Image: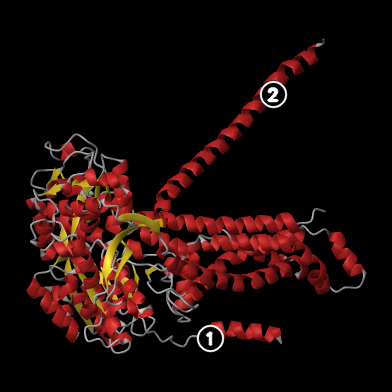
Amino acid sequence: MNKNTQIIKSSLLKRKRSEKYFKYFGLTGIIAALLFLTIIITSIFTTGKKAFKQTAIKLEIFFDPKIIDPENKGTEETYKSANYKIVIKNALLNYFPSVNKRIDIRDLTNFISSSEEERLLEMILKDNTLIGTTKELWLTASSTIDVIHKNLEMLNITEKDRLIDNKEKKWFTKLLDDEKLKFQFNKTFFTSADSTEPEQAGIWGSAMGSFFTVLVTLILSFPIAVAAGVFLEELAPKNKFTDFLEVNINNLAAVPSIIFGLLGLAIFLNVMHLPRSAPIVGGLVLALMTLPTIIIATRASLKAVPPSIREAAIGLGATKLQTVTHHVLPLSFPGILTGTIIGMSQALGETAPLLMIGMVAFIVDVPGSFLDASTALPVQIYLWKSTAARGFVELAAAGVLILLTFLILMNSFAVYIRKKYEKKW
Amino acid sequence: MRKTYFIATLLAFGFSSAAFARDQIKIVGSSTFYPFATVVAERFGKTSGFKTPVIESTGSGGGLKLFCKGLGTEHPDITNASRRIKGKEVKKCAENGVTDITEIKVGFDGIAMANAKSGPVLELTLKDVYLALAKDVPVDPNGDTVKPNPYKMWNEVNPALPAAPIIVIGPPPTSGTRDAFNELAIERGCKTFPGRKALKKKDKRLYKSQCRSVREDGPYVEAGENDNLIIEKLVADPGALGVFGYSFLDQNRDKVKAAKVDGVFPEFEAISSGKYPVSRSLFFYVKNAHAGVIPGMKEYVKEFTASKAIGSDGYLVDKGLIPLAENERAQFEEDGTKLTKFDGKVLNK
């Protein structure tokens, strides 16, 4: 064995070792990232899943004709003007006969969510033969009771630090022992908009707001961005001006989103006087933000189409526009769509620019059009997270779960399209 | 043909500058006030037959800025504030034509200082708070000259306090809570030094900058306008002290406990009687010129000032609002029904 082989042989071991170390380094990084991701997802999931169920209290409701329809008129107006709080109060007092002080009665009626008054009214409107009968119903509990029921260990802390006082604890334990409490599916969460009472708040209003906003974004940014991308890549001459444009588009993609919000405030609200808090303005702002993303994706996928396709088309006498619309664009469409979907999911998760144009607000009505005041999913999560009442903590986590689900769906759709239609040359 | 449509739509977007009619009240302002205003708005929307008002939490200063921008449906109708309107803001309003406003005071809010349940019980004085958190502190006992705040431990400030590092998590300067904290806690602590108090007469500007600034060298941590976040941070770090509104303390008594300030705990009675030193008033301001244009404004003000909302047994009291004395509330209810014009001159007293 000569000297050179010796050197190579001894260094080989060292080089292989350093390669092994490098591999382990990378692996550790990925494992650490996965670990953190798991921790975040589990913590959100364990908090958030609590919001999908809510506490209900079983009560014997007597639809007292004396309260609902004292003069026996039988009209809708009389039903609507009746005070159903008294109906619920009587049912509670029936169950707790020993409660008689005014303040105690008030605290006791606070066990039931105020939304249940409307539910009783709706039942009567649907079927007025209920009046005069007694019915066993599961009524939604107020958020405080719900929080206690979900965290029973809270009963054991001292009265001063507890959410409910000793007499309320006594009532609560009686209901619990008599099996008058159960968890039911929280339908309100999926059907209503924001509320100040956690048990009446839902994600639907903000989901609709996000839908309208992202729809406006899509309608505006997709055609403009694809046209811009095609122009720059296929039709525009290569000169200083187009180079300048290219640099600017790449720069725009890196501009912090809040800047677009400021722009929206200055132009769409202050100059054009579009309504504040409306999805149309949110969509316009987010469209500006997603434009560069889609333009860059469009250009990249146009570039990926081999020149032979273009040459063949031109060789057969097609014009440049025909070459693009008949051949190049259809072939690059999967890539463009992927870029668009990624841009849309970016827009869906954005809050900062919406803050400037008034979409971070308390809105109870579910928006029905582009011009109605509305919030968006991430904004709703932010708003719930900063509210005092305890029940909102889990609502915020549940909101994160919903948002994540949408994002994962959109991104996997993008992956699916790419996998299915992408052509390898 | 299709191209023409496309261009037409674009043009329509560009030139649709006609004012949009609005049948919904728009409210902006304080984040401390936000939880109270939303409760009233929701009830109002359910019971009155008007649309539920839209409420944005912009901070007191931000709200007044938007409010004072002018008249017309693109500007908010009401702004909430966790401090009184300033003379500067009244002037700004007047410049933009907003001259006729009504001031409604709704109640009080205490600012609590609290730490995690597992932490030590703290008994602070305003002087301790000042010495621990001010940017500049007095060199001599009389307080004639100042130096940058050197204190790192609580027991350096006051030997009776524990030997723990000073970490206070509180709101950022844009928050009304911070304004109030600077004025009610830091400045009053500052005034306990005769030399500082004398400075107020000599050089008011210097006094303000020295007696109302919070240190920026680490011990005061700005947490953003999210009181829940402060509470989570306190639980994670039992050595830290947090600054936030009374309603958050009330909702999280199983997690945090309040510190005594000048011997008083921030309790309901102590705040409403004024015994607890760090409490401020909450206001909202109504743009009277909008009252005839936007439906439901008068009714909203009425709902808010009614005894069932902010009276001593009102539903906002359950949410943590500290109510006004009954005769004062009745006065503001009357102002609300008549939309009495606010006289900016009272601010200059």
Residue A135 falls in image quadrant: bottom left
Residue A412 falls in image quadrant: bottom right
Q: Residue at x 77, y 70 (%)?
A: A235
Reading the image, the residue beneath label 2 is A15
Residue A224 falls in image quadrant: bottom right
Q: Which sits in the foreground, B288 or A381?
A: A381
Tell me the kind of residue under disc 2.
Arg
Estimate the x, y position of residue B311 in percent, counting from the top left. 14, 71
Q: Residue at x 45, y 64 (%)?
A: A190
| Mark 1 neighbour class, 10 Å CA radius: few under 14, some 14 to 19, many 20 or more | few
Q: Chain of mark 2?
A: A
Q: Look at the image and name its color scheme.
A: secondary structure
Estimate the x, y position of residue B96 in percent, counting from the top left. 31, 82
Inter-mark Cα distance, 1 to 2: 68 Å
Estimate the x, y position of residue A359 in percent, counting from the top left. 42, 70
Q: Is residue B224 above or below residue A101?
A: above
Please indicate, yes or no, whether residue A294 appears anywhere in the rendered image: yes
Q: Which sits in the foreground, B80 or A90?
A: A90
Tell me the kind of residue under disc 1.
Phe
Q: Which sits in the foreground, B60 or A247?
A: B60
Q: Chain of mark 1?
A: B
Q: Residue at x 48, y 85 (%)?
A: B17
